[in-house]
Amino acid sequence: MIITRFDEAIPFDAATALTVGTFDGVHCGHRGIIDRMKATASAEHERTVVVTFDPHPQIVLAKPDREPVRLLTSIDERCALLADLGVDMTVVIPFTREFASTPPDVFIRDHIAGRIGVRHFFIGHDHMFGKDRGGNEELLQRLGDELGFVLERVEPLYCNGQVVSSTKVRQALQAGDVTSAAEMLGRPYTVTGTVVRGDGRGAKLGIPTANIETPDPYKLLPGNGVYLVSSEIDGRTVYGMANIGRRPTFTDGSRTTLEVHYLDLDTMLYDRTLTVAFRHFIRAEQKFPSLDMFLSQIREDRSTAYELLSNG
């Protein structure tokens, strides 16, 4: 797949099937749009193009008094997932406040039709774009008639009775429901980071942990708690227990951390980049009144993890 930034040269081709969006998470709903686009492109001998934005528009436009959106995927993860889906080209638009002021008709006429080319334009059921989100299906229909492209609307995908969306995936993850999140994503949710040195307490207690630091400050961590997770390490899948939280038993709880105790692994992991896939929620984070009670709970968590693995 070709990845190009919007401020670079883009090869123009009128025979293009195209869709535009943030595509955070590249969830099953997004994949429905892309699969439909690919099917049309194959039948009509067109290339497939996804136009997306970085940074996420909600980060750029966030009000100072509001918490910015937490992301399911970095731009690199997004592009890799789109490549896995067989998209021919992803165009990344650097999103700024200045770009946000672009009128929707100018965006389509000058930037999409004028610079990239489009013959089939695919949108989701709630697609809105441009300044103040003033662009909608009706406007695209008129511009299609004017500029010679066909607009195709893809119906939403439902999971457990609700429309699949990036917001719904975030809500599930924040609630610790990694199982529902995986159903909507079509894969387990993952967090990638570098293993850094901690205080060494886990190793002294016989439960060594990999302290994982994520490079993206906007990356969403699932809700605080203990999870069954997996990582690919030295060519094999290794399972473990991840704790997300503020370690209230041992610290003042000022910082949220991600640490993983890998089961049946005796390997130094410092400075490695690991991807942690969240498989199951085990329990909520809690503060223990004594070290013995903490260690007893860890043994119980380990038993739960093995039971989950044995059940598939």
Image: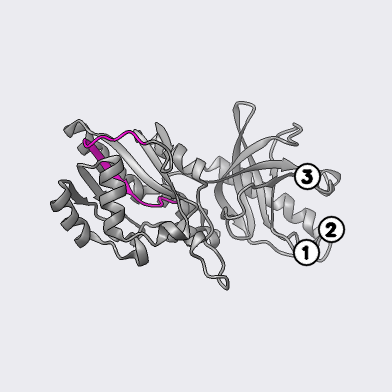
Q: Amino acid at mark 3?
A: Ile
N-term mark: 1 or 3: 3
Residue 192 screen position, x and y as percent: 60, 43
Q: Are marks 2 and 1 in contact (CB under 8 Å)?
A: yes
Residue that lies at the very extreme toward the left in this rendered image: 145
Task: Say which element carries label 1.
Answer: loop
Q: Which residue is mark 3?
A: 207
CA gap between label 2 and label 1 equals 7 Å
Residue that lies at the very extreme toward the bottom in this rendered image: 65
Residue 306 screen position, x and y as percent: 62, 43
The one nearer the camera, 164 or 58, is: 58
Q: Are marks 1 and 3 in contact (CB under 8 Å)?
A: no
The residue at the point 36 percent across, 63 percent down is: 131
Magenta stretch contains residue 14: yes
CA gap between label 2 and label 3 equals 13 Å
Q: Amino acid at mark 1?
A: Phe
Examine the image and state in which quarter residue 155 appears.
bottom left
Task: Say which element carries label 3.
Answer: loop
Q: Amino acid at mark 2?
A: Leu
Question: Does any portion of residue 175 appear in the rendered image?
Answer: no
Examine the image and state in which quarter residue 119 appears.
top left
Q: Which residue is mark 1?
A: 288
Q: Residues within 10 Å of mark 1 (few under 14, many from 20)?
A: some
Q: Residues within 10 Å of mark 3 (few under 14, many from 20)?
A: some
Q: Which residue is mark 2?
A: 291
Dividing the image into 4 quarters, which one contains the N terminus? top left
Q: Which residues are magenta?
A: 10-24
